Image (tube, grey):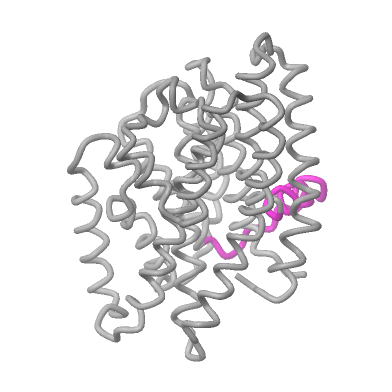
Amino acid sequence: MNYNLNICFLRCISVLSVIFFHYFQNNNELFANGYIGVDIFFVISGYLVSKAVLKKDYNIRIFLERRFLRVYPSLISVTIFFTIFFSFFLIREDLNNIYITNIYSLSGISNFHFYFKNIEYGASDAFEIPFIHTWSLSIEFQFYLFISIFLTFKIVKKIWVLIFLTIFLYFISKYGDDNQKFFFTHLRLYEFFIGILINYIQPKNLKYFRLPVYFLLIVILVYSGNIYFAKEICLILTTLIIIDNNSKFKIYFLRKAIIFLSNISYSLYLIHYPIIFYLSYVILDFKFSNYINLIIYLFITITASSLNYKFIETKFWKKNVKV
């Protein structure tokens, strides 16, 4: 199978940065910028999804059907499994909250649910919700619905229109409180639009700039200190990596690891947080600072994600869909 190794690398580094950000959520010295991995995912999604919509044989019904099969089978399987699993440990009140969250999550509007519940992402109470990370999936699916119609209009396919809209949406994203900036779809749209614009850029060979670009992206995601415009810098670096047409990852084991983690990245994202929730609020004395525990956690998470990828993702989506 032919893989776009640039996209594979970005998926890999993005999901790992989010996982480590959540895992070390009580330790501000590690992966403090890891949350930006979600923003990188939005750029990738904008790029790949718009590529499908811009094709001459585009069909809105087939597009939405494929997007549904991409998102929902794994979301449903993970939701059912962990809800049943948590029912053995949690009190009824906590379970009822999970049931409500599941309804909004499966309806594709959990981002609005968390906002109107005044959940502040990153605050201690937010991490007591095992499926809070589904907010990003809701934004994804809302974008699918929007883009499935938006890019059918000829005028918005013009690059100058897209550039104007991207800049406009970026400045719009600066207005509102922190929770609105986090959970509201229209304040995230500019990231998807960056991905759309990448389709209009001719592939380039980064040559001597390749290693510094990749290295800088990793450093920012791992670095614990404040970096001005960290998100914007990461989105620029993401754009450069996607348009780079000569990335080979010639080291065999590195290449295989990147492809493997990229393939299971969606399952990793879905599964990683319910396990962290279990370790935090059921196994109360779990030591997140212990690196042996981290290895055990990663082993369990990667194993569970691999199983979900093999028995759910590949059955419903992977065999027939290219994007």
> Residue 229: image x %, image y %?
31, 36
Residue at the outermost front position: 92
User: What's the residue at 69%, 68% (across, down)?
Assistant: 317
Give left or right: position of 175 versus 44.
left
Q: Is residue 268 magenta?
A: no
Viewer-nearest residue: 208 or 225: 225
Range shown magenta: 244-263
Quadrant for residue 20, please give it.
top right
Give left or right: position of 268 versus 184.
right
Q: Is residue 257 magenta?
A: yes
Work out whether 145 lies above or below 42: below
Magenta portion: prevailing SS class: helix
Residue at the outermost top position: 285
Work out whether 289 lies above or below 227: above
**Can you say which quadrant of the picture contains the N terminus?**
bottom right
User: What's the residue at 71%, 60% (across, down)?
Assistant: 313
> Residue 267: image x %, image y %?
67, 49
Viewer-nearest residue: 189 or 271: 271
User: What's the residue at 66%, 44% (across, down)?
Assistant: 268
